[in-house]
Amino acid sequence: MYKYIIKGGKPLYGEVEISGAKNAAVAIIPAALLVDGVCRIENIPQISDVTMLLNILKRMGASIRTVDRHTMDIDCSGVTSTNADFDMMRRIRASYYLIGALLGRFGSATVAMPGGCNFGGVRPIDQHVKGFEAMGATVDVRNGLVVAKAPEGGLRGSEIYLDVVSVGATINLMLAAVFAQGTTVIENVAKEPHIVDVANFLNSMGADIRGAGTNVIKVRGVKRLQGGFYSIIPDQIEAGTYMAAVAGTGGRLLIKNVIPKHMNCISGKLEEMGVTIEEGEDCLLVKRDRPLRRTNVKTQPYPGFPTDMQPQLSTILCLAQGTSIVTEGVWENRYKYVDELLKMGANVRVDGRIAIIEGVEQLTGAPLKAYDLRAGAAMVIAGLCASGVTEIEGVEYIERGYEEIIEKLRRVGADIEAVDIREPDDEKDIERIG
Ligand code: UD1
């Protein structure tokens, strides 16, 4: 248990190296269950959600070898269990990808309902269930467990139309369809870069998936996937978070290891706000040397502005000249963090899915809480921009998704440190979890 202490008001200068994409890694690791042989996966981010998933696979019988800090050899040939009812499952959203992967490989899955960040209630999985059922599976959700079973003879290719554009359902159905008989057509799918990355991973191991990145994905069932190499794409949201940070503090950051095209939805908004962005082949130079201007933004599935950047952008809009309107188009309740910004002197009014932000001259440091991963990142940005000292509790949320955030920020001039606030008794809890 740590808290972060930030002495704000310092512009950021230097270079930040972006890690592998969390949202791709947390899907590709369970996808390795479908592969018969060793998958060497590069550019795996060192974050707690990944550690947790690797531990879950290990418990199920996978062999995992660390090649270097960001490269692992994952071999799931030895997995025989179809049961993943572990306590740790309930802590991460991505645990639900084990349903599709286990169902695809073994024809049955018993998996604890997913946890992760909650934006007002339980995360629905009705679209996942609808898709599995269309492939002939029976799915029972009760007592916090999802129990899925393929029909005699295995899952059958089918036509599935998603009623809502869901990243989770798109990936989960792709996983289940890899070995299904015939062709599965999934319509109205999400198009996020990490969906394309999961499809590329599976295809590089022998799957036949077409259309990832468009509205319709077609999966032709194959008999077997075999081991191979894969390198995960850079993290769009981590990159966006550092871009928002330098937009807020002022200064100049070279953001390295990015795919600039994936950043367009974020870069465009920051440019509207008066931030200068120069694009290189795999990097972005981000500068802010004049006052921030207001803008309006609505979060939407990719290629729209990502919901995972909404708290970070809203935070810097608190310091922009004029009135900005933010509309959350994906989640019903993703403004809990606004109360924290109010403690710093921000002027924000939330009405349902809309936040009306009146820019103020300055934020002032305050004791804050991170309520979820991206809200936590927004609190860090707020602390970096504010005058005085900001203390942030609940930082374990932030470490679920940001590799070495303290080190990366310190290297570019931020005054931020992590202070251990564990009581002696907490040590026991940590051993038990590990
Ligand atoms: C969503 C975001 C993703 C982000 C993640 C974590 C989108 C489309 N997805 O992905 O970019 O990384 O949150 O913040 O922007 N839904 C249903 N039934 C389902 C599944 C989803 O109604 O079976 C609804 C959800 O309540 C939500 C929307 O669909 O309103 C998007 O959900 P989904 O994309 O599945 O969520 P994540 O995969 O968590």
Image (cartoon, rainbow, N blue to C red):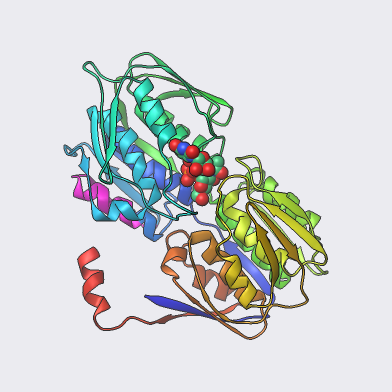
Q: Is residue 234 left or right of residue 8?
A: left
Q: Is 196 above or below relative to 356?
A: above
Residue lying at 20% horizontally and 45% vertically, measured from the top left: 60
Relative placement, left or right, of 410 versus 56 is right
Q: How far across and down, in percent of the image, does residue 64 sit?
A: 26, 49
Vertical comparison of 105 with 346: above or below = above
Horizontal and vertical percent position of residue 187: 53, 23
Q: Is residue 287 above or below residue 410?
A: above
Q: Is residue 227 magenta?
A: no
Residue 256 visible from this viewpoint: no
| Foreground residue among 59 and 389 | 389
Q: Residue at x 62, y 55 (%)?
A: 310
Q: Could you tell me residue 115's position as x and y percent?
A: 37, 52
Q: Nearer the viewer, residue 57 or 334?
A: 334
Q: Is residue 172 above or below residue 367?
A: above
- If the image is split into quadrants, where does the N terminus sit? bottom left
Farthest front residue? 351
Q: Quadrant of residue 295?
A: bottom right
Which residues fall within the magenta stretch?
51-69
Residue furthest out toward the top: 182
Residue 427: in sight, yes or no? yes
In front: 320, or 19?
320
